[in-house]
Image (cartoon, rainbow, N blue to C red):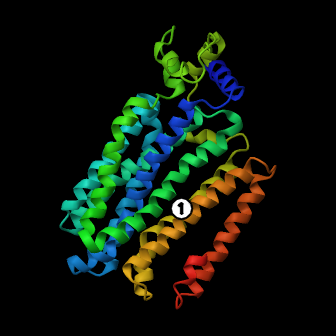
Amino acid sequence: MHNQIASFRAALDARPVSRYQWLILLLLALLLVTDGYDAQVLGYVVPALAQDWGLDKSAFGPVFSANLLGLTLGSLLVTPLADRFGVRRILLACVLIYASLTVLMVFANSLTTLMAARFICGIGMGGAMPSAMALMSEYSPPRLRTLMVTLAACGFSFGGAAGGFVAAGFIDSFGWQAVFLAGGVTPLLLFPFLVWLLPESLPRLLRDAPPYLRLRRVTARMLPDWQPPPATEAENLKEQGSKLTVVELFRNGYARPTLLIWATFFVSLILLYFMISWLPSLLLESGLALNEANLVTSMFLFAGTLGAILMAWFADRLKSKVRLLSGVLAAAALCTILLGLNHDNPRYLVAC
């Protein structure tokens, strides 16, 4: 199968990006817009929800934790499930999970109910992101893979940012329930287009027996004259006898880079989810109105979208991606410290 995948990628890289590939990018970006919106929506709603239920905002800490636990489990479970059932099926299932649970949050009447809903919703959201990224990576030409995957991923931060504007416009007029309803109905409206237009993952299609009818329906829209070469017998035997495990990530000199990559993601996600969960509430307590606090949080996430695009552009042009990443993380650490030092002037957050 490896030689077939290599042949497919070489063919993609030798041709202009097709309309169907741009369509896949658009669909996955829109999907991640809804994913990002639903991941952030609770942070925007908590100040109004706490007031409506007569609770202190700190009481929602377990709800945020349950959501993050669900996100973690969803991310961990998606890979083995996608290998078994296909990336496309798992992605569609994840969309249904987080969309339907977000709609059900409209009817939440207690912290326990909200906690359970956010936990299950988190499983769907956690599984959607890696599935979408895997699918986008498979159908992007190698020369543009970083850019196209990043553009799709930007949908997540864009959706989180858009939630601030939705909350600012909806909460005063329609209540906090409308913000949840928008977050659940939108992916449900997108779902039929995902079912209709998204392809299954390439390795899954190559498991079919020749003449690969499902694969040919997909390649006809991007590589009309490409034919999968026969898989070599040696590769077939190797694939049947090999199984990648987590332990392999710590062998053959990979232990240090594995731990450093894990640590980088860990600290980055701690910062990100702390910001998107608590920033509206903290800004509200600092003296901003609720609508202002939500809009400032949106600007924080919009800046993340712009930063991701710039990072992708530089990453494709710089030899040392490690230096680029180190510089960005150092700048993020400095800005985070400055935010804490300027708690008496919350409008300073907009600049950072």
Q: Residue furthest right?
A: 319
Q: Is residue 322 left or right of residue 190?
A: right
Q: Is residue 210 above or below residue 7?
A: above
Where residue 232 appears, as percent x and y from the top left, is 65, 11
- Looking at the picture, tell me which residue is in the foreground, 249 or 10: 10
Task: Please tell me which residue is depicted at 62% across the width and 56% down the height of the picture.
Answer: 308
Q: Which quarter of the figure is the N terminus placed in? A: top right
Q: Residue at x 47, y 28 (%)?
A: 199
Say which element carries label 1.
helix
Residue drawn 40% across and 86% down? 285
Q: Nearer the viewer, residue 252 or 324?
A: 324
* Crowd class of label 1 (few under 14; some 14 to 19; many from 20; radius 10 Å): few
Q: Looking at the picture, tell me which residue is in the foreground, 351 or 229.
A: 351
Q: Where is residue 49, by image quadrant?
A: bottom left
What is the quadrant of the C terminus in the image? bottom right
| Above-or-below relation of 107 to 137 | below
* Residue closer to the observer: 60 or 179: 179
Q: Which residue is mark 1?
A: 269
Is any atom of residue 65 visible in this view? no
Disc 1 residue type?
Leu
Residue in the image at 45% along x and 57% along y: 159
Residue 209: where, in percent of width, then height?
48, 10
| Residue 105 at least partly seen | yes
Residue farthest bottom in this picture: 344
Rendered location of residue 307, percent (x, y) = 63, 60
Image vertical order of residue 70 relative to residue 274, above or below: above
